[in-house]
Image (cartoon, rainbow, N blue to C red):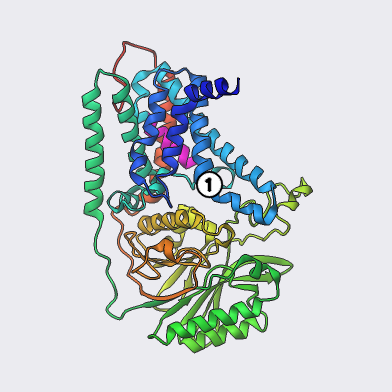
Amino acid sequence: MMRRIMAALLRTYGVALLSGAFLAISFPSWNLYLLAWCAPALLFWRVRRAGVFETAVQFFAAGWLFHTVLLQWLMANIQWVGGVAVIGYQLICLLLALFWAVTGTAWALLRQRAPRFGGAFGLALLWAFMEFLEARLFTGFGWSALAHSQGPNLWLLQLAAVGGVGLVSFVVALVNGLLALAAAERPWRYPRLAAAAAVVIVAHGGGRLLLRDAVYPEDRFEVGIVQPAFPQDMKWSGLYDEQMVHEAARMSRLLAARGPLDLVVWPEATVMESFDREPFRSALGVAAGDTGAYLFTGAVRDADGKSYNSSVLVAPDGEMLGYYDKVHLAPFGEYMPFSELLPFLRRIVPGDMDAGSVQKTLDMGQRTLGPLICFEVLFAPMAESLRRMGADTLVVVTNLGWFGRSCAAAQELDIARLRAIETRLPLIHAANTGLSGVFDPYGRFTPMYPQYTALQTLCHRCIQAFPLALSAERPLRWGPAVTPWAFAAAAMAWCVVGLLWRRGPTAPAAGD
């Protein structure tokens, strides 16, 4: 009986589930990024003649398995909060699968109501709109954008400097739509295949033209990164707060002994007590003085009964030049939504952090730093705001020690890569146990030790110095900020016109 049920489920949902699984392994740390150019096409092909409800269910099934595999690193939270982590992990996957189901519903309605509007172009618009909503609704969690699977594909990713993540995802979704319809319908098969090839060639050719050599200042600007690899148990015990600061300072002195540094960066939450209290304030000043460089570190800041996840900039003479309080906290990690209405939820996140009120840049004379703390690297508008505020360097401090050797660190790194490309700013990525290094404005990453792959330094204690490139001009100044909204407006207009369109003679769908 069970075997028959499983066989029936596989016959019904097997193709959709295969599509979701293949798409998931196109992302880091599997990095089979070429699969992203055909995996969604399996799903699109499967629903080519399906009704609205069946399409929604098939999209939901594919989306659920895709996110379950992609976000499996969330399971690591079981070590910290127990079995409730599994519930939270699956709730996130189910919510994101609902976005897929709504997208499939809209596409099926368009194909039924007005085939002209239900083709590959309309599907790609809907997909870009879906990712736009994922990145903004319910605090935003756009982790699974198609563009994030394309880290090794630097030619294609240069399109992000023109139209942000949405443009890259649109191109990949468009190719998948064309391939699916070409496989499903004999009429117009070869024109669709030709169109898919043309999109791939134009996108990569255009990206290649945008990819330049990074420019470095004549007077080299050297950044030292300390990856201390402090375990989470050590951070939360409260017994090692001073020891961690002294150890990070010792590693910084070893790095400075190799050659002069302009800036030293420690990762998120290296200072687990308020940085402006003794003995931490003096220890940070001494560390900066010993290296002869500015020191930028993740820290805690307590003020007026509130506690912030912060970062602080210290001058070589020990002066505190400024701090930044994290604005966009991670739900279920740094605060629990609805905990005031439902107090029992605090068992999942026992202590909430407080959110900062404004983004800031920190000026160190030679450079103006734009700080982002961990989860904030996910949000393109935040990086865009820092560039508009005058930042010429993005600094991402992060602590993914929660997730061990899972693929979380590799996935976050490719998200950071896109922030560098979109803003055309160099990006310093300093992780506690993750993947540390420097991006140039075109997304090229220099890891801690070039002789190793980035993943080989995961969870290892490392120090390294890097030359920092200058910022670059963007090919379209407001493109990355405006294009996502343009896609959203175009998708809504496309749906409205398509659903109101009076059915006429059968014609090839738009984008075919």
What secondary structure characterizes most of the magenta part?
Answer: helix
Q: Give the range drawn in magenta.
A: 123-136
Q: Give the answer, above or below, for where 444 lies relative to 277.
A: above
Q: Residue at x 67, y 55 (%)?
A: 335
Q: Give the answer, above or below, for where 130 lies relative to 207.
A: above
Q: Is residue 210 visible?
A: yes
State the residue position of label 1.
71
Please tell me which residue lies in front, 363 or 442. Answer: 442
Quadrant occupied by the N terminus = top right
Q: Is residue 205 left or right of residue 428?
A: left
Q: Residue at x 36, y 46 (%)?
A: 33
Q: In this view, does 492 lie to the left or right of 349?
A: left
Quadrant occupied by the C terminus = top left
Dot 1 falls on a residue whose secondary structure is: loop
Q: Which picture quadrant has residue 44?
A: top left
- In this view, the residue farthest toward the top is 505
Please tell me which residue lies in front, 370 or 332. Answer: 332
Residue 253 on image: x %, y %: 48, 85
Q: Is residue 226 visible?
A: no
Residue 181 on image: x %, y %: 32, 25
Q: Which residue is drawn at 49% across and 48% down?
A: 143
Q: In this view, does 86 lie to the left or right of 510?
A: right
Q: What residue type is labelled 1?
A: Leu
* 278 magenta-colored: no
The crowd level at tag 1 (other Cα within 10 Å; few <14, some 14-19, many 20+) is many
Please tell me which residue lies in front, 435 or 30. Answer: 30
Residue 127 on image: x %, y %: 42, 35
* 135 magenta-colored: yes
Residue 62 on image: x %, y %: 48, 33
